[in-house]
Amino acid sequence: MISEQNNDKVEMLTIDEAAALIHGLSKYRVRAMCVNNEIPHVRAGRKYPICKQVLIRWLTEPTSSFQSHAGSEGKIQRINV
């Protein structure tokens, strides 16, 4: 019975783990994105745990706010593949 509940387990990533998951971003950039609220995260003191499932969904699902590129110079944005 316990093994069935493991599917509902939330996996939190450190900044280093999230950076390793997102090819091309350094851990410093991921942390800056957390500090600037550009990436979904939880604040726990001085740490920024990131839910893996939410991060993957945030990176892959299109949003209506993605339609406009005005004022987005220098910012990392999701792309539709």
Image (tube, rainbow, N blue to C red):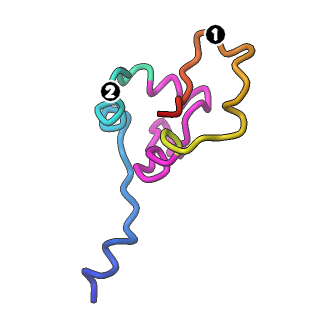
Element assignment for label 2: loop
Is 53 positioned to the left or the right of 69 in the image? left
**Region rendered in magenta:** 30-57
Q: Quadrant of residue 66?
A: top right
Q: Residue furthest left?
A: 3
Which x, y percent locates residue 1?
27, 89
Q: Amino acid at mark 2?
A: His
Q: Residue at x 44, y 27 (%)?
A: 30
Q: Which residue is mark 2?
A: 23
Vertical side of 32 occupied by 57: above or below: below
Q: Residues within 10 Å of mark 1 (few under 14, many from 20)?
A: few
Q: Position of residue 73 (x, y in %)?
A: 63, 10
Number of numbered discs visible in the structure rendering: 2
Residue extending furthest top? 73
Judge whether residue 47 is colored magenta.
Answer: yes
Q: CA distance from mark 2 to mark 1?
A: 20 Å
| Comes first in the chain, label 2 or label 1 | 2
Which residue shows up at 40% across the image and 71% down it?
Answer: 8
Quarter-of-image position of residue 74: top right
- Height in image: 52 above or below 20? below
Image point (58%, 17%), residue name: 75
Q: Nearer the viewer, residue 37 or 72?
A: 72
Is residue 36 magenta-colored?
yes
Q: Residue 56 in the image: x percent, y percent?
A: 44, 45
List the single residue furthest toward the front.
81
* Residue wearing tag 1: 73
